[in-house]
Image (cartoon, rainbow, N blue to C red):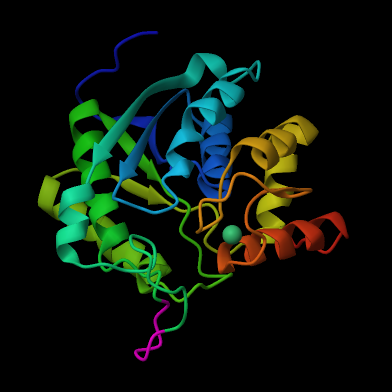
Amino acid sequence: MVDPPSSPVPDRALVLFSGGQDSATCLAWALARYPWVETVGFAYGQRHAVELECRAPLRAGLAAFADWGGKLGPDHVVDLGASMDAIGATALTSEAEIAIGADGLPTTFVPGRNLLFLTYAAAIAWRRGLRRIVAGMCETDYSGYPDCRDDTIKAMQLALNLGLQRNFVLETPLMWRDKAATWAMAEALGGAALVALIEEESHSCYRGDRSHRHPWGYGCGACPACDLRRAGWERWRGGGASR
Ligand code: ZN
């Protein structure tokens, strides 16, 4: 492994990698495209912190693919726990009920989370000389998070490029894909082996349940994240995925 240069290199990437299905697929997407790919993860007191434990086995599994192992660079972990607690409890960071709040936003919405993530990611990319920042935000299976919108990401790219005096490219390969198409994308990138890796090692369940194994992976089977993952998997298996 060589040390990357300190000035930005166009084809070097940093992937926001949580340990979930979407970010695992994004990491495979980046490894298939770019010669050097680093990852960043955030601890923010999420009650499904078990997803962070999925990151190392997923990275190891992806590095075992013949074309990808030599491209996977260091992993960065940023601990935002205390600062996110200070902003306020939500259903992702406390035991509050997972539901739609009076303002129309899910109670799992963590205000400013993705904006903070992208800002930290850009700071790391700036220091590491990485130009592309890859993230799994998606509007199609819209979960009601305004910070996942395409316009939000485009505005963040502009703000980061002005504020850090760089020309980062924020890439969101899942923005217009639904969950079925995300499974199909994994299959196209890495075949049945990648699908099996994501099924087994990635985590989506908001309740952090790793004790129940379904055909589509581990989870409680009842929370909104499990519902999305299962419905997408079933639609993809049934041949209903749009690409
Ligand atoms: Zn669940």
In which quadrant is the N terminus drawn? Answer: top left
Eyeballing the image, is 104 above or below 79?
below
Span highlighted in magenta in the image: 101-106
Q: Residue at x 28, y 56 (%)?
A: 157
The image shows residue 62 at horizontal and vertical percentages of 59, 26
Foreground of the two, 69 or 93:
93
Q: Residue at x 23, y 40 (%)?
A: 79
Give yes or no for residue 142 being in the magenta stretch.
Answer: no
In which quadrant is the C terminus drawn? Answer: bottom right
63 left or right of 101?
Answer: right
Eyeballing the image, is 160 above or below 2?
below
Residue 178 visible, this angle: no
Foreground of the two, 125 or 166:
125
Eyeballing the image, is 144 above or below 116?
below
Q: Residue at x 41, y 66 (%)?
A: 148
Foreground of the two, 77 or 88:
88
Foreground of the two, 114 or 155:
114
The image shows residue 209 at horizontal and vertical percentages of 57, 50
